[in-house]
Amino acid sequence: MAHIYSKGWFIQRLTEAGITMHPVERRKLQLYKTYVLRNLYKDIIESKQE
């Protein structure tokens, strides 16, 4: 279990939603810094909840 809002937590949440690659650059999520993953999470996951 990853700490909440850590890089591993964001990767875990995005892969649960079916996202394993960056939508634009088509590279693995593990290669990106935490702030990039946070922005992806905000755009994709949080926008679905609203």
Image: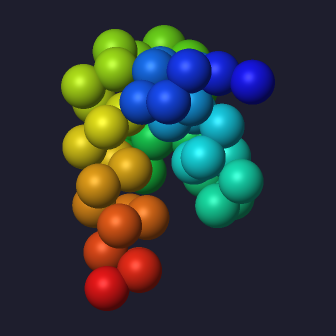
41 and 2: which is toward the camera: 2
Looking at the figure, which quarter contains the C terminus?
bottom left
Q: Is residue 46 left or right of residue 2?
A: left
Image quarter for residue 39? top left
Q: Position of residue 14 (x, y in %)?
A: 57, 48
Looking at the image, is 38 positioned above or below residue 30? below
Q: Residue at x 56, y 40 (%)?
A: 21
Asked if residue 27 can be seen in this view, the reply is no
Q: Residue at x 43, y 64 (%)?
A: 45
The residue sitting at the bottom extreme is 50
3 with respect to 2 (left or right): left
What residue sits 71% from the left and 53% below the top? 16
In the depicted structure, whether residue 16 falls above or below residue 12: below
Is the residue 25 above or below the residue 28 in the image? Answer: below
- State the residue at coordinates (66%, 37%): 12
Q: Position of residue 1 (x, y in %)?
A: 75, 24
